[in-house]
Image: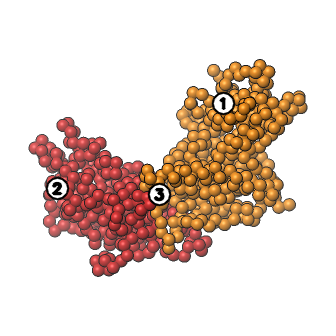
Chain colours: A red, B orange
Amino acid sequence: MANLKELSEKKELFVGGHRLCPGCAAGIIARQVLLATKEPVVAVASTGCLEVATTIFPYSAWKVPWFHNAFENAASTISGIEAAYRSLKRKGRIDKEVRFIAFGGDGGTYDIGLQALSGAVEREHQFLYICYNNQAYMNTGIQRSSATPKGASTTTAPAGTVIPGKVQFRKDLTGIMVAHQIPYAATATAGKWNDLISKVEKALDTDGPSFMDILSPCRLGWGHPPEQTLTIGRLAADTCFWPLYEVVAGKYRLTYKPKEKKPVTEWLKLQGRFKHLFKPENKDLIDTIQNYVDERWQKLLKLCEEE
Amino acid sequence: MSEKRIAKTANEAIGEAMRQINPDVVAAYPITPATEIVQIFSQFVADGKVDTEFVPVESEHSAMSAVVGASLAGARAMTATSSQGLALMWEVLNIASGLRLPIVMPMVNRALSAPINIHCDHSDTMGARDSGWIQLYSESVQETYDNVIQAVRIAEESLLPVMVTTDGFILSHCLELLTSLLDREVKDFIGEYRPKNFLLDIEHPFTVGALDLQNYYFEHKRQEAEAMRESKEIILKIGEDFKGKFGRGYQLFEDYKTTDSEVAIIAMGSTAGTTKVVVDQLREEKTKAGLLKLRVFRPFPAEELKELLKNVKVVAVLDRADSFNAVSGPLFAEVRNALYDLKERPKVVNYIYGLGGRDIGLKEIHSIYEDLQEINRAGKIKSLLTYLGVRE
């Protein structure tokens, strides 16, 4: 378990001065992930908000060795770095224990980078992949991704007079990672810092690849005031829209069970991207979304052997 | 004698060179006709003949991405590919050169789809000609092997990635006598790789691949352009050193009886070997024929070509690729450009040949020299571009 006092005394490895939006969860997540590290870290990032806004040459918000290669190849890039590490360590040219972390948005992870991620996990490289998941291509201006939830309005699946936003449900990427027999996979959300940091610690202590899908509210794309980012992050867990769990060697465990499961509308109504769902003609759609959340939650409880 | 002579295909020779180079990291994906390179090297890894970390990636895009990561991390890193594989790497090729990473990649030339075809032409590497990689072309199995070994030093001294090409099937799968070096000789020749800045230098963290906007990008690209210019001297110096140590000399191109020739062919790859036979036959008949075999296509030796060709009357440029620019093949465009500033320019014509592995033999080369002599006699060009050996 993370200790707030200890964390407050740790050296910051992701620092301020970057140009992420006020209220952006991606920067909060990057900072918390690096605060959870014990060993020296090498980080890579896929093209996306976190990359472009934190490393505008000649500035950088990263106090760790950091590399951005391209959009779809964070996982294959870190494969090469980790292979170099193993090689140079074996030859005695490096003596330190080093950890490797790749950051990708949902575009770079769920979609264009999925093949590279699948390959890197199958090859059992020693690395942690963090998907900061803001549920659309935010860097290019809020286009739909396979992580975008059903009903959300994006610029390529907008709410129109005929089609009410994204038609499809989102992809279960953590499930896909579990199907790779990955030793450690987990979900987390911005606003539940203790849960997030504890999971990063576990992931980095894992022998082999590990994966975390971290919900990252985006005030611009989700349409909420910047000061509500963490509230919305927590509400996603409290409504069970985004349950918090981990899968260790195939075994599911719930890491947070809301005392009272709130209706999904509590979460939807705070975000501009779902505004159109509250028109009378879209009531069925809200019911569909609630039913989907309930079904997924029940399935997860079973997997976690909870009541 | 420190050397041994043994029959090998170019793929085997590349595998052997890679074993002797013993890179820190190899990430590769199989593709015809380069598959054997990956297979041979994997066997070396499995048998403990190298201490390379081998990453059997799931695509060529990931191969180049991993090699870029490994090289930046501080490793001597290699991969190998062909055709569609190179095309899939294209995005990351430019990142490798833009970051000035000394990656070496044997590249077995094969036609690009569509239509799908697995045989030799140069459309794949010509498609990557402006990607900031040094490109060395090889006439034979021997040259392929020697080029791969020299490429390690060329890359590391110029801080540019190098691709060494060899003709698919014609060289990759055909046995030729190879004079290989001893392991110790290769080790001494290439030396240890100790980069000044590398990502795994944990005590000195730095950021690479940052967003480079209007106020810096241009300067960084300008430096890259200068590095490519300066690499010419490095390539020549290393070729000299190689000759001094092992007896086989390498320059930017091979001048095969060009200097006093009236008619000359410029070619790259295995076709140069065929052309040499024709040149010898023509010389016996007192025809002043010559061949300029281009070894280094990037950096393009424009000044040197101009000097060498200034007294030649008619030149044929052989392109084993089309540019689809509605004018000429890619090599022709560069050669004619190089000759533009001469007061008295040779007449230059273009032959696009051998696409998709269409055979080219002595007869076809002879016909080109006949055309050149006819142009020389008539003093004018009838056809600037000829598609040689195609049914029309």
Q: In the figure, residue B55 lies in which quadrant?
A: bottom right
Image x and y of residue B92, in percent:
51, 50
| C-alpha distance separating marks 1 and 2 | 65 Å
| C-alpha distance separating marks 2 and 3 | 36 Å
Disc sitting over residue B209 in the figure: 3
Q: In the figure, residue B256 lies in which quadrant?
A: top right
Q: Is residue B325 left or right of residue B258?
A: left
Element at badge 2?
loop
Tag 2 subunit: A
At x 25%, y 68%, the residue is A192
At x 55%, y 66%, the residue is B197
At x 41%, y 63%, the residue is A60
Disc sitting over residue A108 in the figure: none
What residue is shown with label 2?
A270
Q: Residues within 10 Å of mark 3 (few under 14, many from 20)?
A: many
- Is residue B163 among the parts visible in the rendering? no
Q: Residues within 10 Å of mark 2 (few under 14, many from 20)?
A: some
Q: Quadrant of the C terminus of chain B?
A: top right
Image x and y of residue A129, in percent:
40, 62
Where is A111 relative to B337, above or below? below
Element at badge 3?
loop
Labels 1 & 2 near each other (Cβ < 8 A) = no
- N-terminal label among 1 and 3: 3
Tag 1 subunit: B
Q: Residues within 10 Å of mark 1 (few under 14, many from 20)?
A: many
Where is B353 relative to B93, above or below? above
Q: Are marks 1 and 3 on the same chain?
A: yes
What amino acid type is highlighted by mark number 3? Gly
Along the line of sight, the residue nearer the viewer: A262 or B139: B139
Where is B313 relative to A52, above or below? above
What residue is shown with label 1?
B352
